[in-house]
Amino acid sequence: MNEELIISGRENLMVDPQLHIWHWPIPLYLFLGGLAAGVLFFAALYYLMGKEEQYRTAVRRVPFIAPIALVLGLAALFYDLNHKAFFWQLYTTIRLESPMSWGAWTLLVITIASFIWCALHIREFFPKWDWKYRWLKDLEAFFNRYKKPLAWVMLIFAIITGVYTGILLSAFNARPLWNTSVLGPLFLASGLSAGAAAIVLSSKNREERLLFTKIDLIILGTELFLIVHMFMGFLASTQVQIEAAGLFLGGPYTMVFWIFVVILGIIIPGVLDLMELGGRHIPALIPGVLVLMGSFAFRFVFVFAGQVSRWLY
Amino acid sequence: MRYAMAVDSRKCVGCSDCVVACQTENNVPIGFCRDWVVEVIDGTYPQLEIELRSERCNHCDNAPCVRCCPTGASHIVEGGVVLVKPNRCIGCGACIASCPYDARYPHPKGYVDKCTFCIHRVREGMKPACVAVCPTKCMYFGDLDDPNSDVSVVLKKRKYKTLIPEAGTKPQLYFLI
């Protein structure tokens, strides 16, 4: 027999009996941040490729999701802080060692860039929009002149944001499930697939829909590869990571992970995408919503399961 | 200077006096604790072996909580002691998630709280409250760079271990075995 217990009765709130410091706002924010990163990435990419007219929805319309998602995500983050009155301390320093620090700055940049991008395309939705004030019109002219650099900023910071949502978790070696470098690319892929799905859902242009269905399919395949890769890494690693993988391989998170994330979130929409590309008509709503839900479920499962995984001693 | 603590797992009787002393000395809010006692039982009755450990923050040399803190609220002072500045802490919980020992907790006022090695007492030449109060005198505190400090002397004489050194934290809480 080997038994280990705390006999002085430790019941620290949010820490015992097992860590539960991060609640629903964190995975919600990770999803919204990933989604915003995805839509802004494609908008910037296709603008820079000179295909603004061809893929109008992707470049001009879908980016409007980004500022809304980012503001909601930031609100969720703020809500989860325990010492809210001091949140501004985040913006008094940059600590490159801390993903949360440079992530907060990245978020600031991408949120501002997304607002500017949407302001430049506001006439997509309100053709008669007038900025009224002279200085606002000057500002619009200024950013229209520098739209290319703005798109570059968006492209680069979208990638950083997408990766950061994963690195945020993978930087914690105290939680073996999070402590894998695959998590950065995996969260980026999940965010990009959510972005592509949002475009497929919104576009009325068949050519555009087919392109983003193709892109979505490639990213879903990559995601599946990365997930397999992650489990291979875990199972070939130390005892704590083998146990962390066990949470999804027979442990309490097995069903929710394989059903909601892998089957409903990746495999089924992937097959539907394939059928669509093969010439069958599949309502875009089904794979699109499934991918978004899968991406959402993925963050939830990972944030909660990660807090359960630990070093045993 | 490198402050460290050694706990004799053979002398400890698990009375939890260290826990109460800490709560009193540091005004730890009701329902929380900065230190705790772990009992490990090995074997089958009647051949049992018990190890008792009074645990707390390990004031790691490579502290993940200080690395991941986005504002610099978690910081290191003299002797490698890890502290939190309440008025810089935003309560994001990153440090709590980063600690493999679960030594931190959110204070009801919002900021993150933890063991300070009673640095306020140490600065005045006293021992940490837990060490001072221990009825079996199973705890040793001092400067590892000083060969004559209590902790240096006992670590020279006895076999010891640290908790989860494989997490790469270089913990500074030693358990005599």
Image (cartoon, rainbow, N blue to C red):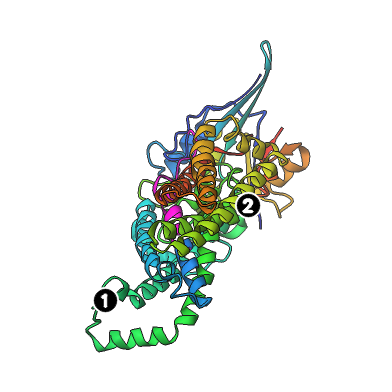
Residue type at mark 1 is: Pro
Residue A267 in the figure: left or right of residue A58: right
Visible in this render: residue A256?
Answer: yes
Visible in this render: residue B165?
Answer: no
Magenta region: which residues? Answer: A17-37
The answer to which of B167 and A111 lies nearer the viewer is: A111
Q: Residue at x 73, y 44 (%)?
A: B153
Residue type at mark 2 is: Val
Chain letter for mark 1, please: A
From mark 1 to mark 2, how far is it between C-alphas? 44 Å
Asked if residue A23 is among those painted magenta in the image, a careful observer would answer yes
Measured as percent of width and height from the top left, residue A298 is found at 50, 45
Chain letter for mark 2, please: A
Q: Quadrant of the N terminus of chain A?
A: top right
Quarter of the figure with residue A13: top left
Measured as percent of width and height from the top left, residue A37 is found at 47, 63
Query: Which residue is farthest front?
Result: A279
Dot 2 lies on which element?
Answer: loop
The answer to which of B24 and B84 lies nearer the viewer is: B84
Q: Which residue has dot 1 on it?
A: A127
Quarter of the figure with residue B45: top right
Q: Which residue has dot 2 on it?
A: A182
In the image, residue B94 above or below residue A58 = above
